[in-house]
Structures are given as C-alpha cells and as structure tokens.
Image (cartoon, helix red, strand yellow):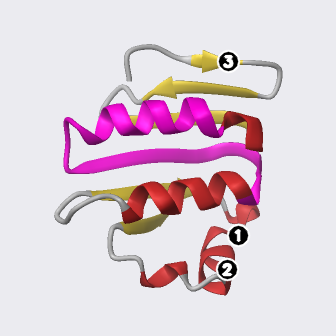
C-alpha cells in the first residue's frame, strides 16, 4: 500500500513490518473500495497479506464478505491472514457462512 486512507470512521495504514494493512475505528460498507484497492496492490507483491483488525470496533458484514472474496481470488501459497480481537467474533461469523473452508483465508487472534 502506497499511503493511507482516512475518514470520520476509519483509519487505514500500511503495516510497518509486513505486507498488509492495519485498520482503526469502524469499517463500514463504504470502505470496501479503498480496502480492495490496498489489498489488491499488496497481493501483487507477496504471498502472505496481513490485515490487522485488532483496533476495529465494528466490522460490517459487507466488509467481511469483501475480505473473504479477496482471499478466494488468491492462488496458494498466497493467503490472507486476518487478525482480530474477540469482540469482532470473526471465527463465529466466518464459520456461520461456511467461509471457514476457504483455504486462502487464515484467522489469528489479535
């Protein structure tokens, strides 16, 4: 990611130590575009793309779906590693939709 994105709800920054993004605030449906652009850019350069959601207070279902769709488009060994706090209930939300079977999507506790 070449820079950052910010508005009243979300701050999106590149990770300092790994290819990927760190989000702060609330990730709403309106943020899908900047997120796709940033993650697509990262996918052209690395096998592991990290998205750190540990500082996200709210994650819209449409944003979660966008992350899954991006992961599905990756070709192994590429994968998307999503870090999130317990409050986002990522494991439960992903399993409820059957997305836990997506091989290019990995979850890690924040």
Residue in front for this viewpoint, 102 or 15: 102
Q: Are marks 3 and 1 in contact (CB under 8 Å)?
A: no
Q: Is residue 108 left or right of residue 96?
A: left
Question: Comparing marks 3 and 1, which lies closer to the viewer?
Answer: 3
Q: Are marks 2 and 1 in contact (CB under 8 Å)?
A: yes
Q: In the figure, 12 relative to 48: above or below? A: above
Q: Which residue is mark 2?
A: 92
Mark-to-mark CA distance, 2 and 1: 6 Å
In the picture, residue 81 is in which quadrant?
Answer: bottom left
Q: Are marks 3 and 2 in contact (CB under 8 Å)?
A: no
In the picture, residue 64 is in which quadrant?
Answer: bottom right
- Percent across and percent down for residue 92 are 67, 80
Question: Does dot 3 land on a helix, a strand or a loop?
Answer: strand
Range shown magenta: 32-61
- Percent across and percent down for residue 110 are 54, 55
- Percent across and percent down for residue 78 are 22, 57
Question: Does dot 1 land on a helix, a strand or a loop?
Answer: loop
Mark-to-mark CA distance, 3 and 2: 28 Å
Residue at the spot x=60%, y=19% of the render?
5
Question: Does dot 2 land on a helix, a strand or a loop?
Answer: helix
Q: In the figure, 27 relative to 89: above or below? A: above
Q: Which residue is mark 1?
A: 89
Which quadrant of the figure contains the N terminus?
top left
Between disc 3 and disc 2, whose residue precedes? 3
Neighbourhood count class around disc 3 (C-alpha, 10 Å): few under 14, some 14–19, many 20 upward: some
Mark-to-mark CA distance, 3 and 1: 24 Å
Between disc 3 and disc 1, whose residue precedes? 3
Q: Which residue is mark 3?
A: 6
């Amino acid at each position: 990611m070449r820079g950052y994105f910010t508005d009243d709800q979300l701050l999106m920054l590149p990770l300092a130590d790994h290819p990927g993004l760190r989000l702060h605030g609330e990730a709403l449906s309106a943020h899908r575009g900047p997120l796709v652009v940033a993650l697509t850019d990262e996918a052209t350069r690395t096998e592991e793309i990290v998205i750190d959601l540990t500082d996200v207070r709210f994650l819209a279902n449409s944003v979660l779906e966008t992350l899954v769709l991006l992961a599905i488009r990756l070709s192994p060994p590429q994968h998307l590693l999503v870090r999130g706090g317990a409050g986002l209930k990522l494991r439960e939300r992903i399993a409820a939709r059957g997305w836990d079977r997506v091989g290019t999507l990995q979850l890690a506790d924040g």
